Image (spheres, rainbow, N blue to C red):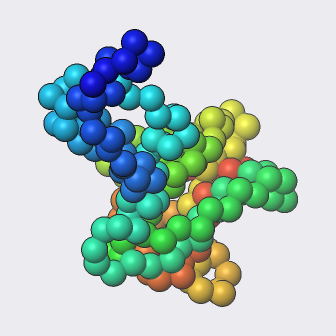
Amino acid sequence: MQTDDSPPFQNRMPPVMVNIEDQNAKDITNLIGSEFGNRFILNLAPKHLKYNPVSDIEKKLGPKMSVKYYLYIGEQKDQIHPLFLRIPANITVLDMMRLASEADPKYKFQAQKSIKGKLYIYEIFGIANDPEDEKFWLLHIGSGNSSIHLTTKVSPDEVYLKNNDKVVMWYKSAKIN
């Protein structure tokens, strides 16, 4: 029975408990909408509804591997931005870069194909290649604890990563032909 000081929906809507840490906003909306015939009030803090691509990957089945991804800026590595990822096995550098850009906006990048059809990265972290100053984003790869080496003959969509690889995109001076 409804009293004058109780909300009008109190006796009609059973309480619903949803663990929003394990759900995304669409799932929660669909769940609550179906429970109450699409007539409901939803008041959830936005911090709980963030899409987390990294945890999305961790929930997927299949083998995973660890990769270290770095952005180096400057000849002497004036700035270093590390990101440690656990990603699906059998993935290219380009795919790993896409996942990194979803996990952290500082890793957002722009790429395009050259006249020869080779994909190259021309902007990361809001810093674009500067042909006049001969500064470019260059891909370096290393395995385990070995030193990194410049990869000029293959593009990021052709390099498949292995467990414990180190990927470095380094913005520095270079002569590009």
Looking at the image, is 6 positioned above or below residue 74? above
The residue lying toward the viewer, choosing from 146 and 27, is 27
Instruction: Identify the image quadrant of residue 30.
Output: top left
Q: Residue furthest bottom?
A: 145
At 33% from the left and 27% from the top, the residue drawn is 10
Q: Quadrant of the N terminus?
A: top left
Looking at the image, is 29 positioned above or below residue 176? above
The residue lying toward the viewer, choosing from 129 and 61, is 61
At 45% from the left and 29% from the top, the residue drawn is 43
Q: Residue furthest top?
A: 4
How many numbered marks does the figure carry?
0
Is 26 positioned to the left or the right of 144 in the image?
Answer: left
- What is the x, y in percent for residue 173? 72, 50
Is 47 positioned to the left or the right of 160 in the image?
Answer: right
Looking at the image, is 94 positioned above or below residue 124? below
- What is the x, y in percent for residue 60? 31, 68
The residue lying toward the viewer, choosing from 116 and 21, is 21
Residue 95 seen in this snapshot: no
Instruction: Identify the image quadrant of residue 49.
Output: top left
At 63% from the left and 35% from the top, the residue drawn is 126
At 66% from the left and 87% from the top, the residue drawn is 145
- What is the x, y in percent for residue 16? 32, 44
Residue 48 seen in this snapshot: yes
Instruction: Identify the image quadrant of residue 99.
Output: bottom left
- What is the x, y in percent for residue 167? 57, 68
The residue lying toward the viewer, choosing from 160 and 97, is 97
